[in-house]
Amino acid sequence: MQLDNLYQEVILDHYKHPENKGLATSYDAQVHHINPSCGDEITLNLTLQGQKVSAISWDGVGCSISQASVSIMSSLMMNKELSEAQTILDEFVALMQSKGSGSPDESVLEDAVAFAGVSQYPARIKCALLGWMAFKDASVQAQKKN
Ligand code: ZN
């Protein structure tokens, strides 16, 4: 798999120095998602304050794409209103479904544009989406609880 060098660097940097990794002991919702085709696993804890994301923490094992993606997702979603988080999520899912022809909006996705090249590799898309789907699941559960 060849990715743009700069993008590859962003992914490797998050893989080596993940953000928000290490599970918080209190949370509104905890989810565990796996990607059996690659062996990626993550646990994600989410806390909401009203309609705003007030804390995300996670732990996981797996390939660099899955782990970097959840790191980038967690830093993007922190302190966002849920409506804003949904916009970011939709943009990322659309990028992953673009088969390499997407033109990601960097003002929305920030570092997550680094995964643009992954959309050309169907086997890796699930790796990149793992953390984002976990966030979606956790936000639904956290809203039910609140
Ligand atoms: Zn993977």
Image: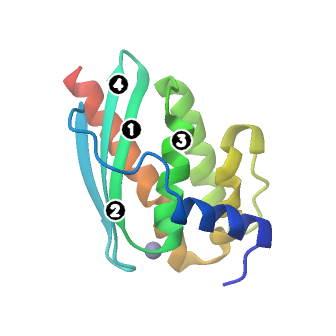
Residue at 67% x, 75% y is 120
Cβ atoms at labels 2 and 4 below 8 Å apart:
no
Residue type at mark 4? Leu
Q: CA distance from mark 3 to mark 4?
A: 15 Å
Q: In this view of the protein, can residue 120 be seen by the observer?
A: yes
Which residue is labeled 4 in the image? 48
Q: CA distance from mark 1 to mark 3?
A: 8 Å
Counting residues from the N terminus, which is met first, the one under dot 2 or under dot 4? 4
Q: Which mark is residue 56?
A: 1
Residue type at mark 2? Gly
Cβ atoms at labels 3 and 4 below 8 Å apart:
no
Residue type at mark 1? Ile
Q: Which mark is residue 60?
A: 2
Residue type at mark 3? Ser
Q: CA distance from mark 2 to mark 1?
A: 13 Å
Residue at 53% x, 65% y is 16
Cβ atoms at labels 1 and 3 below 8 Å apart:
no
Report crowding for label 3: few under 14, some 14 to 19, many 20 or more residues within 10 A (C-alpha). Answer: some
Residue at 66% x, 84% y is 1
Which of the four quarters of the rendered structure image does ligand 1 lie in? bottom left
Q: Position of residue 59 (x, y in %)?
A: 33, 56
Q: Is residue 63 left or right of residue 140?
A: right
Mark nearest the camera among 3 and 4 is 3
Which quadrant of the figure has residue 55? top left
Q: Which mark is residue 20?
A: none
Mark nearest the camera among 2 and 4 is 2
Q: Position of residue 133 (x, y in %)?
A: 41, 52
At numbered mark 3, what does the secondary structure look like: helix, strand or loop? helix
Q: Which mark is residue 75?
A: 3
